[in-house]
Amino acid sequence: TVLEWILMLLIFSSLTVVINTLSYKNDLIQSLPGILVLSAITFVGLLLGKLIPLKVPPIIYMSIIGLVISLPVFGPVSDFVFESTSRISTLALCTVILSYSGIAIAKSWADFKEMGWRSILVTLLVILGTFLGSTIVAELVLKAQGII
């Protein structure tokens, strides 16, 4: 499973860097340290989730690691974490994560086929409507806040 984690992190990181560079016009070279920091936090969180015998989701470990290493007490480390991750657009990360979620949900595509073409059409229209609605709301909120 560790190799699968590394492969997934490479795929997620690569897609995030591409989206971050092309869509949000962030410099490719400057965004690489941030992606490495986020990937390292994710990997260590996954490892801790596997190694520590508590029933705690790995996302909790990732959150704690991210919080701790970004505390001002850690001086140069927290400065580096802040500077490097500030070059990564949150929306670039969300795009990749939500795309993966859609693919994971679509794994049961064979079940959709059994429901008939009308159900598939309705499902696709609902997903499209939700995506477009979310995009419009996000665009309006970001413009209202002066972010874009």
Image (spheres, rainbow, N blue to C red):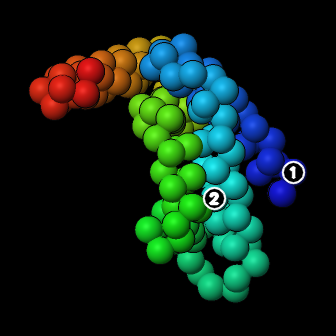
Q: Quadrant of residue 135?
A: top left
- How far separated are the C-alphas under marks 1 and 2? 16 Å
Q: Quadrant of residue 24?
A: top left
Q: Residues within 10 Å of mark 1 (few under 14, many from 20)?
A: few
**Where's residue 111, x and y in %?**
58, 33
Residue of label 2: 41
Query: From this viewpoint, which residue is outermost toward the left?
Result: 144
Query: From this viewpoint, which residue is outermost toward the right?
Result: 3
Q: Secondary structure at mark 1?
A: helix
Quadrant of the snapshot with the C terminus: top left
Is 25 on the left or on the right of 1, as rendered?
Answer: left
**Where's residue 85, x and y in %?**
52, 44
- x 80%, y 48%: residue: 6
Q: Which mark is residue 3?
A: 1
Q: Is residue 57 visible?
A: no
Kind of residue sitting beneath label 2:
Ile
Between residue 46 and residue 106, name the one nearer to us. 46
Between residue 28 and residue 95, name the one nearer to us. 28
Q: Is residue 134 visible?
A: yes
Kind of residue sitting beneath label 1:
Leu
